[in-house]
Image: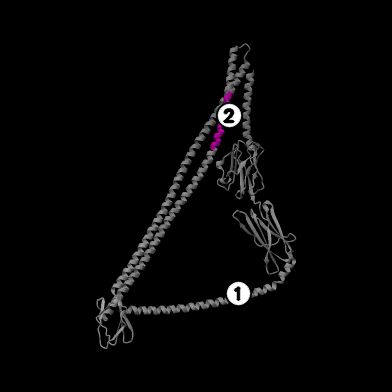
C-alpha cells in the first residue's frame, strides 16, 4: 500500500511539473517590457540607471535581455543570457561600464546601470527580450554639472543713445538658448546667439542686445535648456545718467564721423595720385628700356655685320649647344627612370596591400565556413536532443501506464492469491518506479542540456553574423582598394602620355630652334666668306698702324701710299728685329676718319 501511494505521488509530481512548465510557457506572452516615457537626464561623470521591468512581474533569470543602441556598431550595450554577461558582444566603448541587477532578475527587474557617464553615451536605448518578443525605448540626455554662471558686461554704445550689453556662459550640454529680459520680465529682441563647441564637446554661448532708456535700467540674461529644465540667470544695472550722457555725445559722434569721411576721401585721392604717377613713371621707364633695347639690337646687328668670326668658333658653339642638349636629355632620362622606380614601388605596395586584404578575406571566408559547419553541427545536436526528450517523455508515459496497470492488478488480487505472485508484482512495481525516477532524472538532464545547446546555438549565430559583417566590410574595402589602384594606374598612364607629349613638343621646339640657328650660322658663314673674299685687299692710304707692347710705349706709323696687309699663320710678330708673343702685343688700325679697329 505504501508503494502504491509513493507511485501515485511521483506520478502526480511529474504531471504537476509538466503542467507548470506548460503553464509557464503559455503565460510568458502576457508580460510586457516597460520603461520610462520621459527622457532620462544624467550628469557627466556620474552613474545612471536606465529603468526597465516586466509587467506583470515575471522571473527573467532564464531569459535573454538585450540592451542596444541602434546608432552604434556593434549595437549591443549589454546582453544577459540566463543571468550571464556576454562580454564578447558588447560595444568596446561600454566595456566595464554597464551592469544589471542579477539578484533582481527573479522579480522582473531588467534595468541597466551605466557607470561614469560620458558625453557620447547620450542617445536612444532599446531593451529587448527575444523570448517575449517585447521591447521598450528610452532617451538618455547627458548634461554638464559644471555650467558657469552667465557673465554680463557693458560692450559699448550704438551712437543713438542705446547701450550694448553682452552675456556669456560656458560648460553647457546640450546646446542652450540665451534670453534677455527687461525690468518687467518682458522678452527683448537680441542678435543671433554665437555658439562655440569646445574639444570636450561642451558649448560656450554668447549673446548681445541693444537696450534703451525706455526699457528700464535693470536687465536679466537667462541661459536655459528647456528639455531638462535647467537655467542660469544674471542681471546688470545701467544707471539712467549713463543713457543721458551717451545721448548728449551724439553731436560729438557726428563730428567725428564727418572728419573720418573727409580723411577717407583725402586718403583715396592721395592713393589715386600715387597710382597715376607710378603708372607714368613705369610707362616712361618701359619706353626708355624699349629705346635702349632697340639701340642695343641695332649695335648688335652692326657688330654682326662687321664681325669676322672664324669657322672654328661656330663649330665650337654648335658642339657646346649639342653637349648641353645631350646633358639635358640625360638628366631627363635619369628623372624619368627615378619616377618610374617610384611608381613601380608604389604600385608594388598597392598590390601587396590588395594581396594581404585578399588573404585576410580568404581567412574570413574560411572562418565563416567553419562557423557555419559548427552551427549546423550544434543544430543537429539540438535536434537530436529534442528527439531524445520526446523519446524519454514517451518512455515515461509508457512506464506510468504500466505502473498504473500493475497498481490496478494489485488492487484486484484476491487475498487467496499466492504470496509469491504478489511479491513479484510488488518487485515489478518497484522496478518500474525506479525506472521512472531514472527517466525523470534523464529528462531533467536532457532538458538542461537542451537549454545549454540552445544558448550555444544563439551565441554561434551572433558570432556568425559578426563574421559575415566583417567579411562584407573586408570585401568592400578590397573593392575600394582595387578601384583606387586601377584609377591610380589610369592616372599614371595619362600623366605619362602627357609628359611624353610635352617632352616631344619641347624637343621639337628645341630642334626647330637649333635648325634656325644652324641656318643663321650657315648664312652668316657664307656672308663672312663673301666679305672676307671682298676684303682680301684693303687700301690703307692715309691710315695709321699703332703698336703697343708691355715693354715699351705705343708706336704709330702712317702710310701715305697704298699698302697690302695679309694674314699670316705665325704665332709671333717681328718688328725691329724684336720678338713679342701675341699676348704681349696690341695692334690697332686707325682710319683716316679717326676710327680704331683692334686686330686680334
Q: Quadrant of the N terminus?
A: top right
Q: Which residue is mark 2?
A: 444
Task: Give the numbered dot on residue 264.
Answer: 1
Is the C-beta separation of discs 2 and 1 under 8 Å? no
Quick one: SS at disc 2?
helix
Residue 446 in magenta stretch: yes
Residue at 38 percent across and 60 percent down: it is: 335
Residue 355 falls left or right of residue 68:
left
Residue 308 seen? no
Query: Which of the 4 image quarters holds residue 497?
Result: bottom left
Query: Which of the 4 image quarters holds residue 103?
Result: top right
**Residue 510 placement (x, y as % from top left):** 36, 68
Pointer 1: residues within 10 angstroms few (<14), some, or many (20+)?
Answer: few
Quick one: SS at disc 1?
helix
The residue most toward the front is 551
Residue 13 falls left or right of residue 592:
right
Q: Quadrant of the C terminus?
A: bottom left
**Residue 151 placement (x, y as % from top left):** 68, 59
**Residue 353 placement (x, y as % from top left):** 44, 50
Query: Which of the 4 image quarters holds residue 542?
Result: bottom left
Residue at 63 percent across and 17 percent down: it is: 411
Of mark 2 and mark 1, the one earlier in the sequence is 1
**Residue 367 placement (x, y as % from top left):** 47, 41
Residue 14 seen? yes
Residue nearest the observer in this picture, 62 or 346: 346
Q: Which residues are magenta?
A: 436-457
Up-down relation of residue 184 to residue 585 (above or below): above
Count up the numbered dots: 2
Amino acid at each position: 500500500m505504501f508503494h502504491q501511494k509513493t507511485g501515485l505521488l511521483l506520478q502526480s509530481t511529474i504531471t504537476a511539473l509538466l503542467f507548470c512548465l506548460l503553464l509557464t510557457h503559455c503565460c510568458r506572452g502576457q508580460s510586457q517590457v516597460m520603461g520610462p516615457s520621459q527622457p532620462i537626464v544624467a550628469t557627466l561623470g556620474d552613474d545612471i540607471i536606465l529603468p526597465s521591468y516586466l509587467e506583470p512581474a515575471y522571473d527573467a533569470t532564464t531569459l535573454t535581455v538585450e540592451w542596444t543602441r541602434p546608432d552604434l556598431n556593434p549595437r549591443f550595450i549589454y546582453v544577459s543570457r540566463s543571468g550571464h554577461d556576454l562580454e564578447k558582444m558588447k560595444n568596446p566603448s561600454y566595456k566595464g561600464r554597464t551592469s544589471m541587477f542579477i539578484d533582481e532578475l527573479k522579480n522582473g527587474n531588467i534595468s541597466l546601470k551605466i557607470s561614469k557617464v560620458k558625453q557620447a553615451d547620450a542617445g536612444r536605448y532599446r531593451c529587448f527580450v527575444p523570448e517575449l518578443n517585447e521591447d521598450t525605448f528610452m532617451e538618455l540626455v547627458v548634461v554638464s554639472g559644471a555650467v558657469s554662471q552667465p557673465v554680463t558686461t557693458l560692450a559699448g554704445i550704438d551712437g543713438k543713445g542705446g547701450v550694448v550689453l553682452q552675456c556669456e556662459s560656458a560648460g553647457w550640454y546640450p546646446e542652450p538658448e540665451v534670453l534677455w529680459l527687461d525690468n518687467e520680465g518682458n522678452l527683448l529682441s537680441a542678435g543671433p546667439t554665437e555658439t562655440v563647441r569646445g574639444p570636450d564637446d561642451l558649448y560656450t554661448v554668447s549673446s548681445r542686445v541693444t537696450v534703451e532708456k525706455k526699457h528700464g535700467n535693470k536687465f536679466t540674461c537667462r541661459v536655459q535648456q528647456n528639455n531638462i529644465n535647467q537655467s542660469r540667470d544674471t542681471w546688470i544695472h545701467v544707471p539712467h545718467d549713463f543713457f543721458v550722457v551717451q545721448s548728449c555725445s551724439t553731436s560729438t559722434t557726428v563730428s567725428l564721423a564727418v572728419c573720418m569721411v573727409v580723411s577717407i576721401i583725402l586718403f583715396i585721392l592721395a592713393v589715386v595720385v600715387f597710382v597715376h604717377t607710378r603708372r607714368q613713371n613705369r610707362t616712361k621707364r618701359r619706353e626708355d628700356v624699349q629705346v635702349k633695347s632697340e639701340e642695343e639690337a641695332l649695335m648688335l646687328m652692326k657688330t654682326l655685320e662687321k664681325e669676322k668670326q672664324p669657322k672654328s668658333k661656330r663649330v665650337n658653339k654648335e658642339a657646346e649647344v649639342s653637349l648641353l642638349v645631350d646633358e639635358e636629355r640625360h638628366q631627363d632620362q635619369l628623372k624619368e627612370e627615378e619616377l618610374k622606380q617610384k611608381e613601380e614601388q608604389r604600385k608594388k605596395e598597392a598590390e601587396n596591400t590588395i594581396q594581404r586584404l585578399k588573404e585576410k578575406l580568404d581567412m574570413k571566408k574560411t572562418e565563416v565556413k567553419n562557423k557555419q559547419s559548427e552551427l549546423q553541427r550544434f543544430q543537429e545536436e539540438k535536434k537530436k536532443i529534442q528527439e531524445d526528450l520526446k523519446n524519454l517523455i514517451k518512455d515515461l508515459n509508457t512506464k506510468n501506464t504500466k505502473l498504473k496497470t500493475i497498481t490496478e492488478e494489485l488492487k484486484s488480487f484476491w487475498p487467496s492469491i499466492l504470496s509469491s505472485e504478489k511479491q513479484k508484482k510488488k518487485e515489478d512495481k518497484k522496478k518500474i518506479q525506479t525506472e521512472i525516477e531514472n527517466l525523470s532524472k534523464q529528462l531533467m538532464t536532457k532538458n538542461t542540456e537542451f537549454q545549454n545547446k540552445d544558448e550555444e546555438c544563439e551565441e554561434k549565430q551572433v558570432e556568425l553574423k559578426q563574421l559575415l559583417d566583417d567579411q562584407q566590410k573586408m570585401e568592400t574595402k578590397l573593392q575600394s582598394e582595387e578601384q583606387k589602384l586601377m584609377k591610380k594606374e589610369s592616372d599614371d598612364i595619362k600623366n605619362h602620355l602627357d609628359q611624353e607629349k610635352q617632352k616631344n613638343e619641347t624637343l621639337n621646339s628645341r630642334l626647330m630652334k637649333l635648325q634656325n640657328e644652324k641656318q643663321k650660322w650657315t648664312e652668316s658663314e657664307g656672308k663672312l666668306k663673301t666679305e672676307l673674299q671682298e676684303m682680301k685687299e684693303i687700301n690703307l692710304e692715309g691710315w695709321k698702324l699703332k703698336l703697343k707692347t708691355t715693354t715699351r710705349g705705343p708706336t704709330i706709323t702712317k702710310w701715305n701710299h697704298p699698302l697690302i696687309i695679309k694674314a699670316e699663320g705665325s704665332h709671333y710678330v717681328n718688328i725691329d728685329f724684336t720678338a713679342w708673343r701675341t699676348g704681349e702685343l696690341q695692334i690697332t688700325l686707325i682710319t683716316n676718319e679717326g676710327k680704331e679697329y683692334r686686330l686680334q
